[in-house]
Image (tube, rainbow, N blue to C red):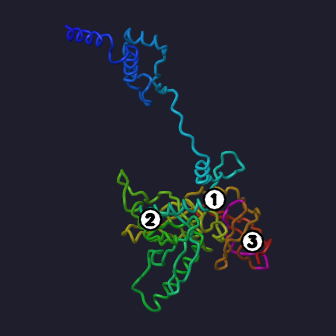
Amino acid sequence: MPQKAETLEAAEEALVQPDAPAAETEETDAQTEVSSVPEIPEEAPAEAVEEPKPKRSRRKKAAAEETGDLSVPETPEAPSPEEPAPAPEEPAAEAAVSSSSLSPRPAPILTLEAGADVETEESLADVAWHEIHNAYRTRRMLTGTLGGLEQTDNGKTIAVVEYKGYRVVIPLKEMVLNYQNHLTGDAYNEMIVRQHKLLSRMLGAEIDFVIKGIDSKTRSVVASRKEAMLKKRKIFYMDTDLSGEYRIYDGRIVQARVIATSEKAIRIEAFGVEASVMARDLSWEWIGDARDHYAVGDRVLVRVQSVNREDIEHISIKADLRSVSDNRQDNLRLCRIQSKYAGIVTDVHKGVVYIRLTNGVNAIAHSCYDRRRPGKKDDVSFVVTGVDQERGVALGIVTRIIRQNL
C-alpha cells in the first residue's frame, strides 16, 4: 500500500527533525531563567534577605559546556551601609557661586587680655534700649542721673535724665509731688520759680523714674518720677511685711541719697520721701559748711527719728546722721583746763564763736584777745577754761587768729 508507506515515512521524519535544535533551545531557556532573577535595588542594605538563586538543571549545564559560555550575568551589588554612595560632583562654576553668596563672618574684637569681653558702643546702646523697652512693658523702675533743666517752646519746664546714653524727659508736674495745678497768675509763677531753684540744686542727683512712653523710631523716652516715688512709698511706708510691721519705722537705720546741699543743711531722699537734715544733726563735730562734707549724689546712712503716715501723698520723716556715727563726747577727757589747742571756726552767731578743735572736741568762746574779729573757717588758737559735760563742749577764749580765711 503506497499511501500508507508515505504516511509512515512522514511521521518518522517529523519525529527525527524537531522545530529547533536542542542546543539552541537549552541555551535560550538558560538565558531566560537567568534574566528572570530579580535585580537588587541600589538602596537596599547589605543585610537585606537575598532571593534564592534558581537551580540549574543538568541540561542547562550541559548546554553551557557545549557552547563554551560559562559566564553568568552579574547582579549589581548594593552599597554597604558603612560606605555611603558618593555624591555627584558639583560643577566648578556652581561651587564658586555658592561660596561667593555666603557673606564673610566679622572677625571678633582683638582684646589686650585673653578671654576679655569687649562690646562696641552700638551693641551697648542696643542693650540699653532693650532694657528701656522691657521696663516700659513691665512698669519697672529705673535709676538715672538728673542731667539738666530745659524750657520748651511753649514755656514749660522739663527735666532731662541721663540713662545709659539715652535722654529721658520728665515734665515738671511729673518730677515733684507737691505740684499745684490750681494756682494761677503770680502764685503759679512763684511756685514755678521755687521748684526750678530746688531742681537746679538737684543736678547730678540719682532719681528713680517709671517710663510712660517711648518712640522706637527716634528712641525718645518720657517718664515720671512722681509715679516711682509713690510706688516706693506704698511698698516701704504703707505696706507691712510678714510680721505685720512697717518696713520703715521710728528708729530704723536706712540708706538715703543726697539730692541737694546747702551751707546749713542737706536734702535727702529715703525710699520716695524727701527730708532736710540740718548741719547740727549731721555729725557730733560741728560743721561749718555742709557742702565741704557732702555732695549731691552721695549715699549716706540715716536714722529715721519719726514717721508721719497721713496718706500716701503726705508722708514725712525726720532723720539725722549724727546718731548713726560714734558718740564723740568722750573726747572731752582729752581737753585739760588752761591748755591751748588749735581749731577752726565753724560759725559766729551773736558774738559767740563756735570752734571745732583739732582733737575733735566742740568748743565755745565768748571773747577774743585778738584785735581782729574771727570769722568762719578761720584758724584760731583756743585756751580751755572749763568743760560742759551735759552739752559735751569745752568753754574758753580765743587767744589769737592764726590764719584768716579771706
- Residue 240 in percent (x, y) is at 37, 56
N-term mark: 3 or 2: 2
User: Regarding mark 1 in the picture, which secondary structure is present there?
Assistant: loop
Q: CA distance from mark 3 to mark 1?
A: 62 Å
User: Regarding mark 3 in the picture, which secondary structure is present there?
Assistant: strand
- Residue 159 in percent (x, y) is at 53, 76
10 Å crowding of disc 2: few (<14), some (14-19), many (20+)? some
Q: Does 292 appear above or below 24?
A: below
10 Å crowding of disc 1: few (<14), some (14-19), many (20+)? few
N-term mark: 3 or 1: 1
- Residue 99 in percent (x, y) is at 60, 50
Residue that label 3 marks: 398
Q: CA distance from mark 3 to mark 2?
A: 62 Å
Magenta region, residue range:
359-372
Q: Residue at x 26, y 13 (%)?
A: 10
Task: Mark 3 vs mark 1: give the one in front.
Answer: 1
Residue that label 1 marks: 120
Residue that label 2 marks: 136
User: Regarding mark 2 in the picture, which secondary structure is present there?
Assistant: helix
Kind of residue indicated by mark 3: Val
